[in-house]
Amino acid sequence: MKRIAVAGLVALGLSACQSAQPVAVEPPPCLAQCQAEQFQQLSQQMIDDLWRLSPTWALYSGVYDYADQLVIPDAEARQRQLAFVAKWRQALAAYDSKPLTGNARTDKALLENLLDSMEWEVTRFKAWQWNPAQYNVAGPFARLMNEEYAELDTRLKAVLGRMANVGRYYAAARDNIDNPTLEHTQLAILQNQGGLSVFNETMLEKARASGLSDAEKALFEKRYLETRQAILSFVGHLEQLERQLKAEGARSFRIGETLYEEKFALDIQSGMTAKQLYEKALADRAQAQKQMLSITEQLWPKYFAGQPMPSDNQQAVRQLIDHLSARHVKREDFVAEVKAQIPELEAFVRQQDLITLDPNKPLVVRETPPYMRGFAGASISAPGPFDKEANTYYNVTPLDGMTDEQAESYLREYNHWILQILNIHEAIPGHYTQLVYSNESPSLVKALFGNGAMVEGWAVYAERMMLEEGYGDFEMELWLMYWKWNLRVITNTIIDYEIQVLGADEATVMDHLVNGAFQQQEEAAQKWRRATLSQVQLTSYYAGFREIYDFREDYKQVKGGEFDLKAFHERFLSYGSAPVKYVRALMLETAQ
Ligand code: ZN
Ligand code: ZN
């Protein structure tokens, strides 16, 4: 209730500390709180300003006020971005972090990091020059056509306005592209070809049948045709570029150590360097492989009585994993099984007193709605910052659309044991639980710019913590599958660093994935491709996990006999989706 009142004041441009107060005879008791409220106002202004600067960013965040505007990505736009950075850096600097609440301090750090990232993208990383895949107009148009945030006529008018600049958008893109990589050029061709499908007959038919005026309809048709033409000619331009790059050689997709460390610092916001994390990953991989071998030795006679274990360790582990993977639910029972597991996870968390679960925010397990079924799997659909009261859904996609062969492969991957780990990760006490806590410390800043490494790291941490606390009764089969699962996030960190910084080639990487981490050839090949197109993102799960786990162990040392796992978890999550290094600092400040 109180929270709503404060939000109301902020919306009116007032804050509690500006309202008339009797002359204080004692120091105001809420210095930090007052400062935090003023700071919240400032961050709201900065966010509003950001939406004006980047209508597309706004649109993807659920703000449609500037949806009819398409920014031309030219030098002038980059100047406006840098001016935005300078202006808001100065505004934020006026706030001393010390007296702010923990929530406001972490918000401030996130906003400063956002500005640093924006500047770095323009002046240092310059993907706007070498990554043609940055240029694609289709996504926001698809969203305007499909997302029913307003009447169709309103949305069509936004589409109409937005189409006006498409020609100039792609002209600026051509001017910007300079010495691109072959891989990103090819990606841009594919994605822009795909983007054409957004500008299909249905779009035009909807416009013709709409309430737009005749003049608007005529303009719509004209711009629609121009848009298609602009995309086609951009693709043609890129295809020509591709031939040239193939013949003459192209820039490497590897960004090298300096830029990698800089990107890692900005994207992950870790207390470690990328190199330090890489070294931890190497040690963890050795540890995981060792554990898997040890479990395999113990379980071998149970499953392969009378058969000697292969002398090749990796082969032995793989053979046992293959054998165990046959234990899985029937395809038609997949969704029901996930549904049945949620109350079991809840019960375990309560019995072991691991963290308080709010019974008023139940998780609704449902079949993934058809429009969201891009690929099979499970995901959490959280209410966004602008519709907080909505349900949280655990979307589980039934295997209806799969052939028998596909379903079998999928079910072997999400076998009896991995499925439980997946549910811990996605639901309880993973993403869903973190989300409930995060919504308790409402921060628009964190809802919009929260730290991905912390969010994924928490879910990965939850897997390990549950098993350590005895979920599954220390069953060796479960631990074997856990290590295989964990090896994936460890290996992602290793290959990303080795590819981007150390120059590892495809054969080396495939060996890490297939032989080192027991992955299927197909999965590994996709991972290689992804790792050539992105940088740092693959490390986020492991980076967050390692930092949370290490912090917990350090915190245990500090607290000694007073350490309480539940209290640690609840305090840790109370700061929202803030980078682990800030939560760590805040918790240690008051721990002794
Ligand atoms: Zn089977
Ligand atoms: Zn996750």
Image (cartoon, helix red, strand yellow):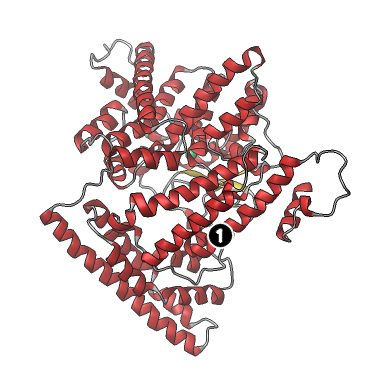
Nearest the eye: 508 or 478:
508
Q: Position of residue 448 (x, y in %)?
A: 55, 50
Q: Specify the farthest residue to the bottom.
A: 214
Residue of label 1: 62
Q: Position of residue 285 (x, y in %)?
A: 35, 23
Give the residue at x 75% y 53%.
15
Q: Specify the farthest residue to the left.
A: 247
Give the residue at x 43% y 37%.
540
Nearest the eye: 188 or 195:
188
Which kind of residue does numbered mark 1 sit on? Answer: Gly
Sort mark 1 into few (<14), some (14-19) or many (20+) by Cα contacts within 10 Å.
some
Q: Position of residue 142 (x, y in %)?
A: 44, 65
For residue 1, say whether it is visible: no
The image shows residue 476, relative to residue 418, as above or below, that is: above
Along the horizontal axis of the image, is 425 left or right of 493? right
Q: Quadrant of residue 49?
A: bottom right
Give the residue at x 53% y 62%.
51
Q: Secondary structure at mark 1?
A: loop
Quadrant location of the C terminus in the rendered image = top right
Along the horizontal axis of the image, is 317 left or right of 356? left
Q: Position of residue 308 (x, y in %)?
A: 26, 11
Along the horizontal axis of the image, is 484 left or right of 64? left
Nearest the eye: 374 or 242:
242
